[in-house]
Amino acid sequence: MTNLNPMIKEFIDYLSYEAAASSHTVEAYNRDLKQWADSVTDHGKYPLSPETITQSDLRMWVLAISRSGASARTIRRKVQALRAFYKWAMRFKGLKNNPADEIVLPKLDKPLPVYIRPEETAEVIDSASEGSDFESVRNSLILDMLYSTGIRCSELVSLLDSAVDTKKGELRVRGKRNKDRIIPFGESLSEKIDSYRAVREKETGNDVREFFVRSSGEPLYRKLVYNIVHSSLQGHAHATRLSPHVLRHSFATDMLNNGADLDAVRSLLGHESLATTQIYTHISYRDLKNNYQQAHPRAKKQ
């Protein structure tokens, strides 16, 4: 592998320090552009001249990495890395065009969300409700709130105590792009919230900002919530993934299966587009089809 080209290094530094890109994006783009530079310079035998690269050159490179077995997701990211690099070079280095702009990105398969059946969810939440110590009460409420409201793990972790109103039966959640939304909840969850607050006060005192805290009074973090959910679901739920997001998917699926309006579910989930929510209707249809095939005497070959 050649040393990182100075122009690419400058772009990577720009991503890191000026564009404030995530460390994951920086590392991936760094790797992708190194690979690309290695290819077009024949492992450093020739200088890298981005201005001489044509759209045809890039198509040949994409074809080569496709034939090497790279996934559609990986190819998309590599092309996006090139697009971002050329866009930067046009802005700061005087390049006249972006040959990566017209490269067609491969389509991604959209797998259906993983969810848990209602009877399994009920079993998990009921079994988690047996303890009376602070962590048991808190962990049971975490599971119930994720499933009963459909909030994201990040939203649960950042949920403020002042945003949880049991008299109104409402959560005020700050979601993606700092957009607030109100989520209603029922009496059962209200009772569990009141019980948790009483136990929390005995454990940590009443001076808390975040709703969910550790026994020290410090807020939760995402990995801890993941571990709580994963260990609670393990052995009880038959799903390929056992994460907080699975409970969000289960919330949406069960709402739609029980007749909720699609736009109402979109609003509760905090989706901007109805198309994002519509994937759950495919799950509902799949369940309907499975039920038909299992129950109808003419559904199977005789």
Image (cartoon, rainbow, N blue to C red):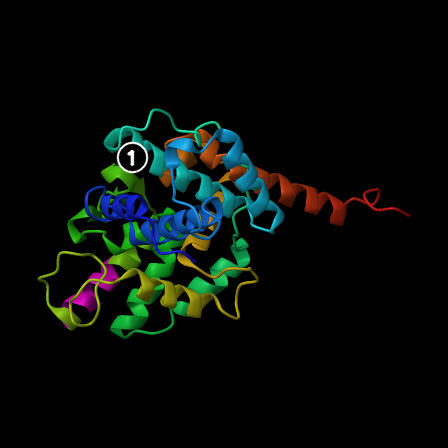
Residue under the image location 38 percent in, 38 percent down: 49
Density class for disc 1 (Cα within 10 Å; few <14, some 14-19, many ≥20) is some
Q: Is residue 233 above or below residue 114?
A: below
Query: Circle 1 sits in a helix, a strand or a loop, which is it?
Result: helix
Q: Position of residue 70 (x, y in %)?
A: 56, 50
Q: What's the magenta region?
A: 194-202
Observer-nearest of 289 and 51: 51
Q: Main secondary structure of the magenta part?
A: helix
Residue under the image location 53 percent in, 63 percent down: 237
Asked if one can make out residue 271 in the rendered structure from this viewpoint, the answer is: no
Q: Position of residue 22 (x, y in %)?
A: 29, 50
Residue reaching furthest to the left: 207
- Residue corresponding to mark 1: 88
Q: Position of residue 150 (x, y in %)?
A: 38, 47
Q: Position of residue 160 (x, y in %)?
A: 18, 51
Q: In this image, 44 relative to 292: left or right?
A: left
Q: Is 200 colored magenta in this rendering?
A: yes
User: Quarter of the image containing the N terminus?
Assistant: bottom left
Q: Is residue 236 above or below residue 146?
A: below
